[in-house]
Image (cartoon, rainbow, N blue to C red):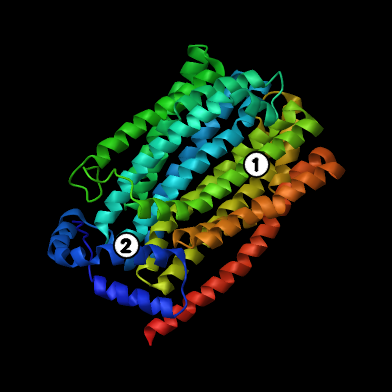
Amino acid sequence: MNRIFEIDCVHLQSGLQSNKKNGIRDAFFLVQETFLSTFAADSRRCAGELNSQIMTIGIPTELGTEKISRLLRQYAIPAIIAMTASSLYNMVDSIFIGQGVGKYAIAGLALTFPLMNLGAAFGSLVGVGASTMISVLLGQKNYEVAGKVLGNVVVLNLIVGIIYMVLVLTFLDPILYFFGASGQTIGYARDYMQIILIGNIVTHMYFGLNAVLRASGFPKKAMIATILTVITNSIMDPLFIYGFGWGIRGAAIATILAQTISLTWLVVMFSNKNQLIHFKKGIYRLKARIVKDSLAIGASPFLMNLASCLIVILINQGLKEHGGDLAIGAYGIVNRVSFVFVMIVMGLNQGMQPIAGYNFGAQKYDRLSKVLLQTIGWATLVTVTGFIISQVIPRRIVMIFATDEELIAHAVRGMKIVFLFFPIIGFQMVTSNFFQSVGMAGKSIFLSLSRQLIILLPCLIILPQFYQVRGVWMSIPIADLLSSIISGFMLYYQINKFKKYDHAAQR
C-alpha cells in the first residue's frame, strides 16, 4: 500500500475542482489530479508522521511565505554560481584546445556542438521534467511520490544514456561529415566525441541528479557539485592536453572524469537515509504516470535542445559553404562567449523554478507574479552587460581563445552581429522557463520552438543566399527580436489570468 505524506488532501482536491471550474487546463493540474486521486486515501492516515518528519528534516515551506526577493537571492545565487562555473567549465576546454592544439581543433570542437545539444536534449527530457515535478510535489507536500520520481530519474537516465551512446558511436563519422566536417577537422571532432559518448551515461546521471538536488531545496549543494566539476576539469585539462600530450582527447577525458567525481558525491548524498528524498528500495520501478508526466513537462527543454541541434547543424553548414572551416571555428568561439551570459540567466531561471513551482502549487498567484518580474529584471541586466562587452571589446575576448589572425577576424565580426539584440534575450528565456516551471508544457514548448524553427530556421535558409556568411550571422539576432515579441504577448495574457484567479480566491 502506498503511503504519501500529504497535508489536507481534501482541501487540495476541492481546490483542484474549483480551479477546473474556473477553466484551468494546464498540465500541472493534470499531474495534481493524477497523484491526488490515486494516493489520497493513504495520505490522510500519515499526517502525524508527516509533522514529525517536517520537524526533523526541515522542508522548505519558506517558499510560500518568505519575501520573494530574499528567496530569489537564496535560490538563484547558488544556481548562478553553479551555472557560471558550468559555462567556464565548457569554456576552459575551448581555451586550452584553441591555444594549445590549434585553429582547426577549435573548429572540430564546434562541430560537436549539435551532438552535445542532442545529448543535452535527452538529459533535459528526464532531468528537467523530474525536477519540475518534484518542486510541485513538494508544494503539495506529496513526499513519497517525489521519492519515486527520484528513482525513475536514475532508471530513465541509464536507459537513455546507453541507447544514445550506442547509436551515435555506430554512425559517428557520417554524422560529423553531415554536420560540416572536412578532412582537416574530422579527426579532432571524432577524437573528442568518442570519449564524450563513452562517458555519456555519467553525464546524464550527473546532470539529472544535480537538477533533482536543486529542486529538492538544496541549491547550495547543487552549486558545490557543479563547482567541484569545474575545478577538477580545470586542473586536469592542462595536465592531460599538454602534460600527457593527449591533445583534444585529453580535454574529453578530463570532462568525463570530473563529472564522475561529482556524480559520486551526489550518489553519496542521495544515499543518506536522513534526507526525506533519498535512494531506497521500491523507487526504481518505472511508474507509467510518473514517466508520462515527467516526460511531458521535460518535453519543452527537450524540443528546444533538439531544435538547437538542427539549428547548429544549419549554422555550421552555412558557415562552411560561405566561409570555410575557420568560420565554423569562429562560431564556436562566439557560442562559448554568449554561453557565459546565457548560463547566468539559466541560473536565475533555476532559482526561480522551485519558487514559482511551489507558489503555483499553493495557488499564490501574487507571489508567482512577483518572482517572475524580479527574475526578468535581473536577467535583462545580465544580457545588457553581455551586449556592451561584445560591442566594446570583442577582439580582447576572442583572443582568449585564438591566436590566428584570420580566425580572430571571423569571430569579431560574428560576435558584433550575434549580440545585436542580446539585451532582450533575458526576457525571452525567463518567460519560456516560467511556463515550464509551473507545468504549462504547451506554452513553453511553443516559445522554445518559435525562435528556433518558426523564425531562425527560415532565416538560415534564406539570408545566406543573399548575404553569404553575414547572412548566417544576421539570422540569430533577427530570431531573438521576433521571438521576444511573441513571448511578451503570451506573458501579458498569462499574467492577466493569474490576476483573475487571485481576485477570485480573495472573494
Q: Which quadrant of the structure image shows residue 424?
A: bottom right
Residue closest to the far top = 244
Q: Which quadrant of the structure image shows residue 137?
A: bottom left
Residue 169, how many percent across, how many down? 53, 25
Q: Nearer the viewer, residue 406 or 355?
A: 355
Q: Nearer the viewer, mark 1 or mark 2?
A: 2
Is 399 displayed left or right of 139 in the figure?
A: right
Q: Nearer the viewer, residue 439 or 362?
A: 439
Amino acid beneath label 1:
Leu
Instruction: Judge whether 209 appears above or below 188 on screen.
Output: below
Q: Nearer the viewer, residue 416 or 48?
A: 48
Residue 74 seen by the camera = no
On residue 310, the disc is 1
Q: Which quadrant of the structure image shows residue 449?
A: bottom right
Give the mark, 1 or 2, whose residue is nearer the N terminus. Answer: 2
At x 21% / y 67%, what residue is drawn?
41
At x 45% / y 61%, what residue is drawn?
439
Label 2 sits on residue:
35
Q: Look at the numbered disc 1 and give the secondary structure of its residue.
A: helix
Is 339 displayed left or right of 327 in the figure?
A: left
Residue 120 seen by the camera = yes
Instruction: Judge whether 275 appears above or below 178 on screen.
Output: below
Residue 212, how many percent across, how many down? 36, 47
